[in-house]
Image (spheres, helix red, strand yellow):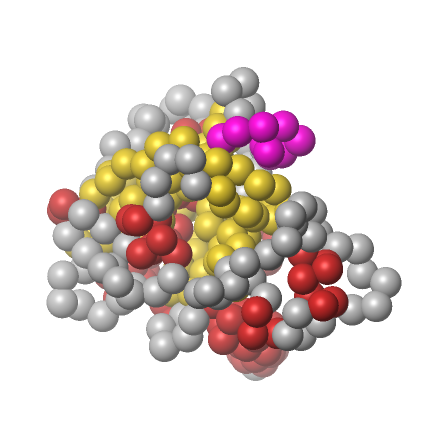
Amino acid sequence: MAERPGRQPRRVHSALVVRTERLTPHMQRVVLGGEGLADFAAGTCTDHYVKLLFPPVGVTYPEPFDLQRVRDELPREQWPVTRTYTVRQWDAEHRELTLDFVIHGDEGLAGPWAMRVRPGETVRFMGPGGAYAPDPGADWHLLVGDESALPAIACALEALPRGARAYTFVEISGPEEEQKIDSDVEVVWLHRGARPHGEALVEAVRNLEFPEGRVHAFVHGEAHFVKQLRHLLRIERHVPREDLSISGYWRRGHDEEGWQASKREWNARIEAEQESVSAA
């Protein structure tokens, strides 16, 4: 879909790959840097994200790169494909941007790219966006997600002051995917194994004995389990909408384009269902 008339073009940053690192069998880190990040800035959100731009195979763009010009002059099939990734760390002093990628062999677009990319290669992206950071005024925090939400959860944990009360559940495929996080909060690693995706997370939150006081919750990952937890937290536990950051980062059977195209309708339907239940 072309840009709406009058809409301001989004700023595109160009960076260079500085280094890469395999964190776990299914998590690859890519660190970006270079002069192209001179005007990049990230705020206090712990769920900051960027949208990477991948040109279709065989397509090159004239320099200097102008996304609006590409969209105005080239057919839709030659536009860059976007993939959204959480900012794991932004080091403003050294001007380095760290992104972590879930990888499943040759499956997908960004994962295989992250495995193959080498230092010196150019990466273009838009952003950052983001809206969540742990509220210091909350009595306690709830952080729940699968591998796709792990970078944002890790950032949130590292932003919490020592001694903050938080319950954190992260579902991963197995023990080899656990990561070290610089926080005194205990992370409950749920090993999925052969269980359906997200089932262990829903079970863990349902079985949690909620403390007294106001909770600030962050729940992200695959859309189907997020839907179940949205109902549990909003309807059963009566967590106010303003104290809940909850969204499906991805959906089984959909690539990012397909999920983003249907996400607004999906969320609106869930909200309507929950409003109906609340009013009953």
Tag count in the figure?
Answer: 0
In the image, what residue occupies the spot 69% across and 66% down?
Answer: 71
Q: Is residue 181 magenta?
A: no
Which quadrant of the figure has residue 148? bottom left
Horizontal side, residue 214 vs residue 103: left or right: right
In the image, what residue occupies the spot 61% across and 42% down?
Answer: 13
In the image, what residue occupies the spot 52% across and 63% down?
Answer: 59
Task: Please identify the dominant SS of the magenta region.
Answer: loop
The x and y percentages for residue 257 are 51, 71
**Please, is residue 209 above or below residue 248 in the view?**
above
The x and y percentages for residue 225 are 36, 67
- Which residue lies most toward the right here? 6
The x and y percentages for residue 275 are 60, 75
Horizontal side, residue 150 vs residue 79: left or right: left
Which quadrant of the figure has residue 128? top right
Asked if residue 170 can be seen in this view, the reply is no
Looking at the picture, tell me which residue is in the foreground, 40 or 213: 40
Q: Quadrant of the C terminus?
A: bottom right
- Which residue lies most toward the top here? 93
Horizontal side, residue 15 vs residue 1: left or right: left
Span of residues in magenta: 33-42
The x and y percentages for residue 193 are 14, 61
Asked if residue 18 can be seen in this view, the reply is yes
Which quadrant of the figure has residue 186? top left
Looking at the picture, tell me which residue is in the foreground, 102 or 36: 36
Looking at the picture, tell me which residue is in the foreground, 87 or 198: 87
Q: Quadrant of the N terminus?
A: bottom right
Q: Is residue 36 magenta?
A: yes
Looking at the picture, tell me which residue is in the foreground, 152 or 144: 152
